[in-house]
Image (cartoon, rainbow, N blue to C red):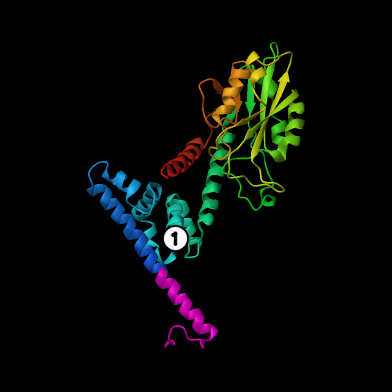
Amino acid sequence: MTMPAVGSNHLTRAQWAQRLSDRWREAADNMLQAIYQLGQDLIAAKDDLPHGDFSAMLASDLPFTHRTANRLMAVARDPRLWTQVSNLPPAWGTLYELTRLDDSTFDRLVGDGTIKPDMQRSDVGKVLRLQRVQADEARVLSLRPRPGIYRTLVIDPAWEYDWLSIAGRAKPGYAMQSIEQLRELDLKQWADLENGTHLYCWATNNFIYEALKLIEHWGWQHRTVLTWNKPPPFGLGSYFRNSTEHVLFATLGDTTTRPAAASISTDFDAPRGEHSEKPERFYDIVRAASYPPYGEGNQREPRPDFTSLFETVESPGADTFDAAADAIEANEAAE
């Protein structure tokens, strides 16, 4: 097709569509080639430079970060991508997300047309999130209560939000619990009924009311609320932007706090961690204000003095579930 010179105002819609499509494909091809070549050059530089020089170069000599370099190298190293060049999106961030997929998922997304030039990074994120949720749901199914009696219990419910109503936010990458499921949890099986038991129940702003009812249902008496003040950036919210998270403190039986609690404020500042990760400052407060032994439900980070209230039992297919979870964790660690 003979096209008028650039800048002409006399193209038809079809001609403009043809020109713009051609420019897009040309730019995409060049971008993919540039991304691949940059990743290959980074790999070569890492192999060629003396020990320490590569990291030093990334730290001070290049217009991108060490993290970006690692992702570009991961893209260049993944042979699956470069057999699908015509289907690839010309964005290195999206390409990196594709490297995190296992082979069967990658092949499925190629086959059903999900992997295509206009694919967005968030599209891959949804797939990875679903894998994490499925792995976590499988893990939850293999759990059973661990026998034990504790003076202090920490519970971090995986509250089941109506996520579609919260600014379009995507669901988290773990199994969630409905109010009905949480009500079925028998917390008293771990309680020290003779000496009394403290309960710390985490709740977001949206679920404080439900958490209060849940504590009463479990048999504890609500006493006060501790508030974690989070640093910016603010979280999402339906009415106001969330910058706090709360811990409802309750007691069972004739018990009080340790003397140190008299000098502990009901609010505390602490840095953010990963999604749903609770700050170490909170655990310092629990140690100072409440009595050991400490039991924790939905434990996300093992601590020697906080015993998980659940243990894993082998079940049919458990190896498959563990392998899926391990693969996801390995991919995320590679970031």
Residue under label 1, please give it. Answer: 91
Residue beneath the point at 26% across and 44% down: 53
Residue 310, x across and y down, in percent: 58, 26
Secondary structure under tag 1 reads: loop
Q: Is residue 12 above or below residue 306?
A: below
- In the image, is residue 5 part of the stretch drawn in magenta? yes
Q: Nearer the viewer, residue 199 or 112?
A: 199
Q: Is residue 90 above or below residue 14?
A: above
Quarter of the image with the N terminus in it: bottom left
Quadrant of res 212: top right
- In the image, is residue 22 part of the stretch drawn in magenta? yes
Residue beneath the point at 77% across and 31% down: 213
Residue 163, x across and y down, in percent: 66, 48
Say few, some or many: other residues with alpha carbon within 10 Å of mark 1 (under 14 / 14 to 19 / 20 or more).
Answer: some
Quarter of the image with the C terminus in it: top left
Residue 22, x across and y down, in percent: 44, 76
Q: Nearer the viewer, residue 26 or 117?
A: 26
Left or right of 162? Residue 20 is left
Residue beneath the point at 54% across and 83% down: 13
Quadrant of res 27: bottom left
Magenta segment range? Answer: 1-27
The amino acid on which the numbered mark 1 sits, given as a three-letter code, is Ala
Q: Residue furthest top?
A: 194
Residue 244 in view, yes or no: yes
Q: Nearer the viewer, residue 44 or 78?
A: 44
Residue beneath the point at 52% across and 51% down: 125
Residue 145 in view, yes or no: no
